[in-house]
Amino acid sequence: MASFDLSHFTDSAQQRFGNQFSSLARDARHLSDALSRYTDHAGRDLGHFAHDFADDALHQGAVAARVLGKQAWKAGKAVRRDPAPTVAAIVGIACLVTLVMSSGSRRR
């Protein structure tokens, strides 16, 4: 760390510089302490929030997976019993996609 030569200043000027530097050091220490307390508190809150969010997302994902699994099982059974509606739906979607794609190319 560099040192500064204040010998060319008067004693009162050196005293004022010393007081200002002490004041700045005190302010910096208070600011550092305040930021430390804030980040500790905010970090703890953020950690709790992230943990709760992850737990909730995991729970919701498991519920959604169960529901989708049941629906897929029911749909599979329905298609095995009568595949005609599924084939008709696939053909209808293919026709709709073809219409949309061809109308978009005509506008260009």
Image: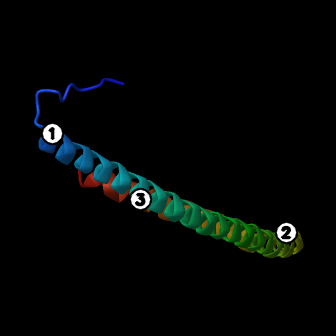
Q: Nearer the viewer, mark 3 or mark 2?
A: 3
Q: Is residue 93 above or below residue 3?
A: below
Give the numbered dot on residue 11.
Answer: 1
Apparent side of residue 3 relative to residue 47 in the rendered image (left or right): left
Coordinates of residue 93 in the picture (x, y in percent): 57, 65
Coordinates of residue 25 in the picture (x, y in percent): 35, 48
Q: Residue at x 39, y 58 (%)?
A: 31
Please tell me which of labels 1 and 3 falls first in the chain.
1
What residue is shown at x 79% (from left), y 76% (from top)? 67
What is the CA distance from the residue labelled 2 to the residue labelled 1? Answer: 93 Å
The image shows residue 58 at horizontal and vertical percentages of 75, 67
Disc nearest the viewer among 2 and 1: 1
Residue beneath the point at 10% across and 36% down: 10
The kind of residue tagged 3 is His
Q: N-terminal of the two: label 3 or label 2? A: 3
As measured in the structure, the alpha-carbon distance from the residue carrying label 1 to the one carrying label 3 is 28 Å
The residue to which callout 2 is attached is 76
Secondary-structure class at tag 3: helix
Relative to 28, 42 lies left or right: right
Q: Quadrant of the N terminus?
A: top left
- Sort mark 1 into few (<14), some (14-19) or many (20+) by Cα contacts within 10 Å: few
The image quarter containing residue 80 is: bottom right
Point out the tag, 2 or 1, that comes first from the N-terminus. Answer: 1
Q: Secondary structure at mark 1?
A: helix
- Mark linked to residue 30: 3
Above/below status of 107 relative to 1: below
Residue 41 image position (x, y, % from top left): 57, 67
Q: Is residue 45 at least partly visible in the picture?
A: yes
